[in-house]
Amino acid sequence: MGPEQSGGFEPATGDGPPPAEPAAVRAASVRTAFEGLLQIRRLTGGGAAGPAPWERNRPVRAVALALEHSGSAPSAVDAAGRRVSAGYRVSGGESASSVRVEWVGPPGSGAVHDEEEALSGCATVLRGLGWTVLLYRGPRRRRYLEVEPPGGMSGGHGRS
């Protein structure tokens, strides 16, 4: 994956509109991008052991790509910024190298009831790719994941 370019592939973070292209086209793009990520890992000597420098420098994109490739559903918003579907939302975390993963959705979508199981699945995917993942409870007792490259977590006040 080269320099970030306007109009290039962007993994779904859960804060954008639903993908405009047909599902099969999107799936092929995700697969190609994920294969590129794995190739970067091989070329940088990390193999599947953990995030490569490219991922460490773009953790939101890397985590979103991993989750989308796994088949997890991203949330989406309409042009007015209203949530239109339930799914994961990936955003910057508390430090530059960390990422926050939440399970969100529009009112009445049941996202709050699905979050424990859905986030557990997200954590499994990310741990399998070498990320360090901790589960926390935030405001209104909503769960979220804090994700960092190995060795990046500080504190240890969460539970995995």
Image: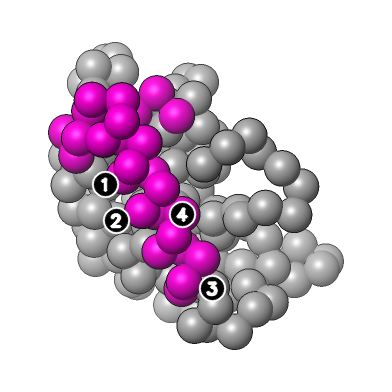
* Residue wearing tag 2: 122
Nearest to the observer: residue 26 or residue 120? 26
Q: CA distance from mark 1 to mark 3?
A: 21 Å
Residue under circle 4? 33
Residue 158 image-quadrant placement = top left
CA gap, disc 3 to disc 4?
A: 11 Å
Q: Position of residue 133 (x, y in %)?
A: 25, 37
Q: Look at the numbered disc 3 and give the secondary structure of its residue.
A: helix
The answer to which quarter of the image holds residue 122 is bottom left
Q: CA distance from mark 2 to mark 1?
A: 6 Å
Question: Of marks 1 and 3, which one's residue comes earlier in the chain?
Answer: 3
Q: Secondary structure at mark 2?
A: helix
The relative height of residue 123 versus residue 104 in the rendered view (above or below) is above
Amino acid tagged 4: Ala
* Mark number displayed over residue 126: 1
- The mark closer to the camera, 4 or 1, is 4
Residue stretch rendered in magenta on the structure: 27-54
Q: Are marks 1 and 3 in contact (CB under 8 Å)?
A: no
- Please provide percent x and percent y for residue 37: 38, 44
